[in-house]
Image (cartoon, rainbow, N blue to C red):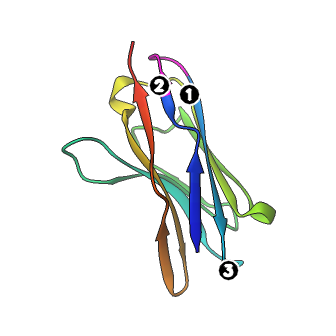
């Protein structure tokens, strides 16, 4: 399984960005796709996950600001990030977890700064 993420960049506080991650290869019909992030000097942390049956899980710090969605036909997951804060600055990693495997994308930088 390969994951290709895109959509990061530089945005001012209060702004929005949308991340996308497309999975290819042997993707099972039942899986969990999601986003994690890692800020400099910190451990990687969960941002949001979404199962194929639409169960979501969000970190408390992003609830109400970020929305995760997916297109199962395209094996693609999205992260709409609104009301961005400087503390959201991090490298964002796409993840796919399924039976027999846990896969990571290459990471995309999100910088929130004025």
Tell us which disc is closer to us: 1 or 3. 3
Label 3 vs label 2, nearer the camera: 2
- Tell me the distance, in whole angstroms, between the alpha carbons under discs 1 and 2: 13 Å
Q: Secondary structure at mark 2?
A: strand
Badge 2 local density, few (<14 within 10 Å), some, or many (20+)? some
**SS state under label 3:** loop
Res 84 seen here: yes
User: Pointer 2: what residue?
Assistant: 10
Which of 94 and 6 lies nearest the eye of the viewer?
6
Mark with earlier residue (3, 2)? 2
Q: Which residue is mark 3?
A: 28
**Is 4 displayed left or right of 35 in the figure?**
right
Residue that badge 1 annotates? 82
- Residues packed near mark 3 inside 10 Å, few (<14), some (14 to 19) or many (20 plus): some
Which percent across, then down, holds residue 103? Answer: 49, 71
- Tell us which disc is closer to us: 1 or 2: 2
Residue farthest toward the bottom in the current orientation of the protein: 100
Q: Main secondary structure of the magenta part?
A: loop
Upstream in sequence: badge 1 or badge 3: 3
What range is drawn magenta here? 10-15
* Distance between the alpha carbons at the discs numbered 3 and 2: 34 Å
């Amino acid at each position: 399984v390969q994951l290709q993420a895109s959509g990061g960049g530089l945005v001012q506080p209060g702004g929005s960005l949308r991340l996308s991650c497309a999975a290819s290869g042997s993707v099972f019909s039942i899986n969990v796709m999601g986003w994690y992030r890692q800020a400099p000097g910190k451990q990687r942390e969960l941002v949001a996950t979404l199962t194929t049956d639409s169960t979501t899980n969000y970190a408390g710090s992003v609830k109400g600001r970020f929305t995760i969605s997916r297109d199962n036909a395209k094996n693609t997951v999205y992260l709409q990030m609104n009301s961005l804060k400087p503390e959201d600055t991090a490298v964002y990693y796409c993840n796919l977890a399924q039976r027999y495997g846990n896969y990571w994308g290459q990471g995309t930088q999100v910088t929130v700064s004025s």
